Structures are given as C-alpha cells and as structure tokens.
Image (tube, grey):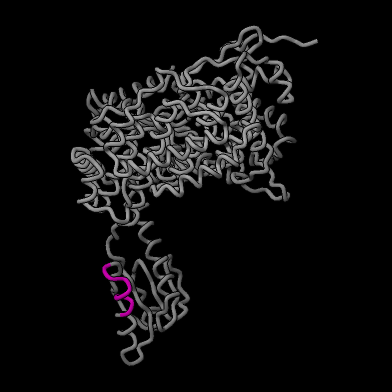
Amino acid sequence: MRTCYPEVTAGDHGGARVKEDRRKRLVSVLESADSWVSATVLAKMLGVSERTIRNYVSELSDEQGIISSKLGYRIKASSGAVAPCANRQDSASVTQEDDMTARTSMVLSRLINAKTPTSLFELSDELGISESTFTNTVLPAVRSELSAFDIKLVNHDWHLSLRGSERDLRRLLGHVATQNVYGYFTSTKTLAKMFPDFDTDEILSELVGICQSSELLLSNYSLNNLLVHILVIIIRLDSENVLDAADDLIDVNGLLERVQQRDEILRCANKIASLFETKFHCTIPERDFRQIILLIALSTDRGDYATLSTANAAQLIDQEFLDSVHKVARETTDHYGLSPFSDDFLLQLTLHSFNAYQRAVFHVGCPNPIGEQIKQSYAPIYDMAVYYTHRLQSLYDVEFSEDEIAFIAFHIGAYIEKNAESGDAISCVVVVERYHDFSRTFAQALETSFVSELSITDVMSYDDYVSDPKPCDLLVTTIDLPVIHPYKVLVAPLLGKHDIRRIRSAVEGINEDREVDRARAFLRGLLSDRLFSRNVELASSSEYIDYLGSLCQDAGCIGSDFIQDVKLRERVSSTAFTDCLAVPHSINQYAERSFACVLHNDKPIHWGRGAVNIVMLIGLTREDMHHFTEAFDIIIDRFTTMRTTAIIMRSDTFEEFASALVDGR
C-alpha cells in the first residue's frame, strides 16, 4: 500500500531541505579546499554549531570519503593520498549532483511532453526512489528550475503538470539542455537522454550539414546554441506542440532587411523546413518557421572580425549604434581610469555588442559555458563589462543576460591583457667577467632584448659584486654567485632564447610583485575600524547594503544617492563573486572618500543565489579608480583558496581581519 504525501509547501519540509542544502555545501567546500578545514570555519560558513558540523561529517564520512585530524576535515582522494578534490569527477558528491540534475531533467522532460497530468508515484518509481525522497528533494529542484520561466508546477491529487505558454516551455527546455552539469557542448546529448524516443543524433547530423553549407558565419558557440534551439522546436513540433498567437511577436521581414545575408538565412531556414517535412511528413507552422529564421539570423555574425573596417561596419550596423558604443566605451575607460580603447578593438566590440543587442531585443539566449569562471577569476574585468552593458542597455531599453555580460568581459579582458603597459623600468645589475669588451656587448644585448623594461645600473665582475653588492630589482649573472636574491637569474655568457625566457619570467614576476605591493598598500588604506562590524542580523541583502551605507554616510565617505546606485549595480548582476564574499559597489557614482566597509558574520547571509559571510561595501573616488583592478584582484584572490579563506573566517577583531585580508596571515 502506498503512503500518500501532501504537496510540499514552504513550511512542511523546509527543515529537511535546509539540512540537505547545508550538507551539500559542506561537501562542496571540502571538495574545493586546498588544505584542512576546521569545524569552526565550517560552522561559520554553514551557519550552524560545531557540534552540528561533527554530526554532518559523521553522516557523510563513509559516503563522501571525509577524513578528520586535529587540523579539521578533508576529502580523501581515491589513491589514498589526501588531496584537493575540486576536479575529481568521480567523487560521490559530484555523482550525487549529476544524479539530481539527471532526475530533474527527466521529470521536466516528462512533464513538458505529457498530454495529461503525470502521477507523482509513477515518476518516483521511474527514478527508483521513494515518494518521500521525490517529494523532499526532486520536487524542490524542479520548482527551482521553473521559477525563472513563469511556469507553474501544478499538483492535483498527486498528479503533476506544468502551466505556462509554449514559448516559455521551449525556453525552459533549452535552458535545461544548455545548463546541464556536463557542460555546454554536451547539450545535444542531454536532449537525447531527455527524449530517448526521438532520433536526436540523426537530426543533429543533418542540421550540422545544412548549417555548415549555408555560407553563414557561425562560431562554435553560435552553432551549438542554434542547433540546440532548433532541436527543441523540432522535438516540440513532433509532439504536436505549436506556438500560440501570443508567442509570435516577430517582425521577420523587418529583421532581414537589416542583414546582408538575407538570402543565405532564408535558404538555410527552408532547408531545415524541408528536412522536417521529409522526416516527419508534415509542414512546419508559419509561426515556428519565423522562429527558426529568427534563430538563424541572431546566431550569424554580421561580419568577419578579420576583415572588419570602419567602412563596412557602417554598412552592417546603424551609425547611431556605432556612435553609442563609442560613447559608452569612452565612459567605461574614463570610469575605470584606463587608456582609451583602440579603434580596431572598438570595431570588434561594436559588432559583438550589436549581435548581443539583437539577441536581447528578441529574447534569444546564447549560453556562455565559462560565464561563472570569468566572473570569479576575472572579477574586475567582469565588473567593467557590467558597467559597459548597463550604460548600453540604458540607452536602448533592453536587458543583457549574465551570459552576454560574460562574453563582453571576455572581449575586454583579452584586449586589456594584450595591451597591458609595462611598469616602471626595473633596476638590473649584471655580473659578468670583464674580458675585452665582452661585458659591454653582453649588457647591450640585454638592453636590446628588454627595451625600456630594464635599467642596467651596474655591470660588475664577480669579485666586485661579492665585496660590494649593489641593490637592484633583478640580478643577472653569468657566474653562480653565492648570494641570496629574490630575483637572481643565472644565464650563459652568450644570451640564448632560453636565457631570455628566464629573464622575461623574472621581469614579469617583479612587475606582479610591484602590483601586489601597491594594491596591498592601497587596500590597507581603505580599511578602518570605524567601518568594521561583526554579526549583524538583518532580513535581506538590501537591508545589509542600507546598514553599511549608513555607516559610510556617517563617516563622510558617500553622499545620499550612493546606496541607491549600489542597489542598481546589484540588480544588474549579483556581487557575490565567490563563496563567502560579496562586494557590493556603485555602478555610476564615485565616493567622496575611498573606503571599504566590512561586515563579518558567523551566520551566512543570503546573497543572490547563494550565501556569504563577508560583505565588503567598496567605494572609490574618481582619482582612485585606477587602483580598482589591482585592489579588487587582491580581495577576490584571498577568497579563492580555502587556506586564506579559513584565515579570514577565523578573524574576529578588525586588526585580525585586516591582516588576514591584506597579508594573508
């Protein structure tokens, strides 16, 4: 006899879900840890007692391979050695995550295609789990997926169904396919698993042939995205699910009038329609055909980046849009204290921005497989992209997704890295035997290889240097000197390519050390015990921003409008860049005095889609904005390894926190 369980509500099984979420987060923290993690740190990160942490570990130790010592907890590698597990795809927790993703996808695909409500008990049987497990774990995950798509999960007499428009159901299906745990480029495999009765591979093979022979410019990202969405349309049509009249708001003719590849796009769409008619012996409805044309048009690059010029850009893109991108780009470089972008890069940025703008206008997504990685690993660059897209979308009343913001961040980051300016010249002492004019020739060769980067202050013999060593940033020697120097490079008397590479590595190391030292000094100057708080409990991230803002306003650091600008930045994209840390900051306004206002809570604070323990409200004056990238990098870097995160989490007083953040100790 079956046991019946009522529909899950916010309060019925909330405790069980909270516990499961905390257990998953504990495993996630240990997986990414590069050192032992103490019960104290875990308790703060999860917002529970140390006793609860010990209970969780006891429950999970065998299943997850958690081991303990006087230093805390870690996950044991399969070889028996203790090692970080961030990349272990065979770990039990990853398997569990995969299972949950697969279960959620299976339930969604069954409900999307079902003509009548589906039995909750039938679904749990298919998954091989109990009704209680299905109700307490799978259903919340399903509801979480549906929440962003204006689709309701209806539970009537233990039978489940979805309520939403066909357009939203297709959006959901495309999202499930492209956001799966295995990665972007396996999205078609996900569709194949979700619809085993549909010959996905055969259709995909023919679609690839059609697109590749279309003479359209399609990048790998665009092609995969296009294929997934066309597959979704064909799968839905095969199940006799067509777009409603309300879903069809596309002015295809108006769109095609503005693209040069109009004929190629139409030929490609007609070939796809013919393929559908051949395989399924029916005609694609006009509304769906227009949707296919739209997808092809918005997946096609409007020009070749390699042959892009001012002349042909004006033919591809409206002059008004060109002018807008140039204006916003100038505002971006000015806001962050950067040198103006080059004309060549502005052309590339304009073309990419126009493609992104068109996708935003027609609500066509282009998933970014490395979006979260860009946001966390290149937080300052991502922030520049947020500023840029915010200014652009305010001009055109559109909204760019976080995926599109990350694509733009990738463009900006690649440009900045390629055009990074060298720092001040590095002082260099050369130790080489004085044999005829060999020492002079050697020094000249070194200067030629490192024009404007090195300043050779002395060329000395072995005996001279040992008796009177001269201070310098870099010591280059052809003789093995018995001295300690942070940047000593032993090279051959005749400089070869290998020697130049080793000196180049040392030069880059010195410049990085200089940047870090400058950033640390600047960051330390932002911190103040007047702007440091511990364990403040409020209801929402907005209230925490208000609280920290009031401290800054009382200290004379900001004006009355600054906090509203911070909230605007938060709405564009969450500032929770890592686990444990959120860095809210303004998007348009400057501070009256540069500052970093810190809240350190033992109990996690809900922020965006996750939770944090540290909130750092930051504001910089216009004059200090050129320090933004270096200081931001230092802050984020401290929270990317568990060792430094644990040090910060253990801090209690302001001085302890400042020392942990700035110096990592």
Q: Residue at x 55, y 38 (%)?
A: 187
In which quadrant of the rendered view does residue 350 lie? top left
Camera-side residue: 452 or 274?
274
Q: Is residue 451 magenta?
A: yes
| Residue 519, horizontal then vertical, whole percent | 34, 48
Report the residue that reaches farthest toward the top: 157
Quadrant in the picture for residue 112:
top right
Q: Is residue 512 above or below residue 410?
A: below
Nearest the viewer among 65 and 288 is 288
Q: Quadrant of residue 558?
A: top left
Q: Work out whether residue 117 or residue 519 is closer to the camera in this orientation and state it.
A: 117
Please determine whether, in this image, residue 492 is positioned above or below residue 307: below
Name which residue lies at 43% across and 36% down: 577
Classify the position of the N terminus by image quarter: top right
Locate residue 476, reporting x and y percent: 39, 74
Relative depth, front residue between 334 and 241:
241
45 up-or-down from 36: above or below: above
- Evaluate whether residue 185 shows in this view: yes
Q: Where does the image place residue 422, in percent across and percent down from the top left?
A: 29, 60
Q: Position of residue 202 (x, y in %)?
A: 60, 41
All told, the count of numbered labels is 0
Q: Is residue 427 left or right of residue 277?
A: left
**Residue plotted at (31% across, 71% down):** 450
Relative to 379, is 172 on the left or the right? right
Name the dominant secondary structure of the magenta segment.
helix
As for residue 238 lying within the magenta part, the answer is no
As drawn, 164 above or below 365:
above
Residue 514 as seen in the image, left or right of residue 613: left
The residue under the point 60% across, 26% down is 109
Start-end of magenta stretch: 445-452
Q: Is residue 650 visible?
A: no
In the image, farthest residue toward the right: 1
